[in-house]
Image: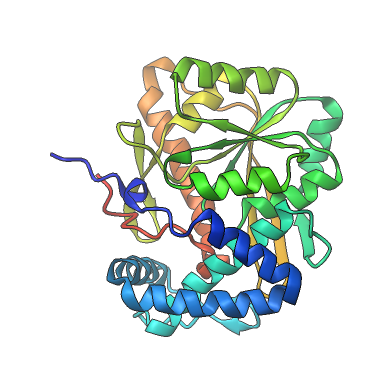
Amino acid sequence: MTQRRGWLDVAEVGSVWGIRFVVLLCSAFGRRSARAFLRVIVFYYVLMNAGARRASRAYFQHVHARSIVVPFAGAAYQDSGRATFGMVFRHFCTFAEVALDRLLIASGKRTPFEVSSTGRAHLTTLAQQKRGAILLGAHLGSFEAMRLGASSQSLPINMVVNFSNAQRLQAVLEQLDPSSTTRFISVAGEPLQFVLQIRECIERGEMVAILADRFGADARTSEADFLGGRARFAAGPFILAAALRCPVYLTFGLYGGKNRYDLHCEHFADVIELPRKQREQALAATVQRYADRLASYVTRAPYNWFNFFDFWGQS
């Protein structure tokens, strides 16, 4: 069977020129004008891209399976059983607005944002104890917003990234904020070297952030119940955490509309235990617990989900 690569098949949209143009537009006319410009681009993209619309609608069907109605950005997510074009458009607009804010945060324009934080004491304590930890996140909201809190406290964070389909955006982010306390570890190259880099960071008492909702081609996965269906998640982050025997925390930066971000950090495990005789069962249980907590945050902010592909149909 030919493996569908899911998110790896979603080509990067935009160019360095386009990204820089939006930053300049925002600098010259303000964030509101740049957001209005982005909405025009998003409308055209959603109108012309049937695959993107299908992925968004399929996602909302899974959210509907949870039978929820939650507030978002001053309005409510309407659980009507089907996703309208307006909902899909708003879904992509949220992604575009968060992407714009990533550029603003990376370029040092951090004062416009109103940020609330829940669980930041976990990270502060780790930094004070000089104890390394793994931070598990997802493509939900903005990890860039997590840097707002990390930068204010000079918390060293190493972000594990896959540059396969976001090389141009990542290049611009690094150029905009070369002095950031956030460093990047690429999964490309030799697996052993990648693991050694992470271990060295943990041993230095630094934090390593991994977005655990996606997996690469030929990567080991584990299946879990998620939003009313079965979905596959990367097993690697959990196996790695078990091998390093370091504490694990969940971290999410949820976009609340306008200029508001709600940062969340919660304890996941002091040490992930994967006993040899019950390794697969323990791994499946651990991944399921992550999927359950992720689902909880997704239902708080449904429009913050930024996996625009068939998440449940990956093979």
Q: Is residue 218 visible?
A: yes
Say left or right for 39 vs 149.
left
Residue 207 drawn above or below residue 228 = above
Q: Is residue 144 above or below residue 86?
A: above
Q: Position of residue 242 (x, y in %)?
A: 53, 23
- Number of marks: 0
The answer to whether 155 is drawn above or below residue 139 in the figure is above
Q: Is residue 68 visible?
A: no
- Determine the image quadrant of residue 180: top right
| Residue name at image x 48 percent, y 72 percent | 91
Residue at image location 52% in from the left, 61% down from the top: 298
Q: Relative to 159, is 92 on the left or the right?
A: left
- Residue 177 percent location from the top left of the image: 73, 45
Q: Residue at x 47, y 74 (%)?
A: 42
Residue lying farthest to the front in this orientation: 17
On-image quarter of the C terminus: top left
Looking at the rendering, in which quadrant would you find the N terminus? top left
The image quadrant of residue 47 is bottom left
At 37% across and 66% down in the image, what residue appears? 59
Q: Looking at the image, is 226 positioned above or below residue 58?
A: above
Residue 125 pos. (x, y %): 83, 35
Name the quadrant containing residue 27.
bottom right
Residue 285 at what x, y percent from top left?
43, 37
Q: How is the image coloured?
A: rainbow
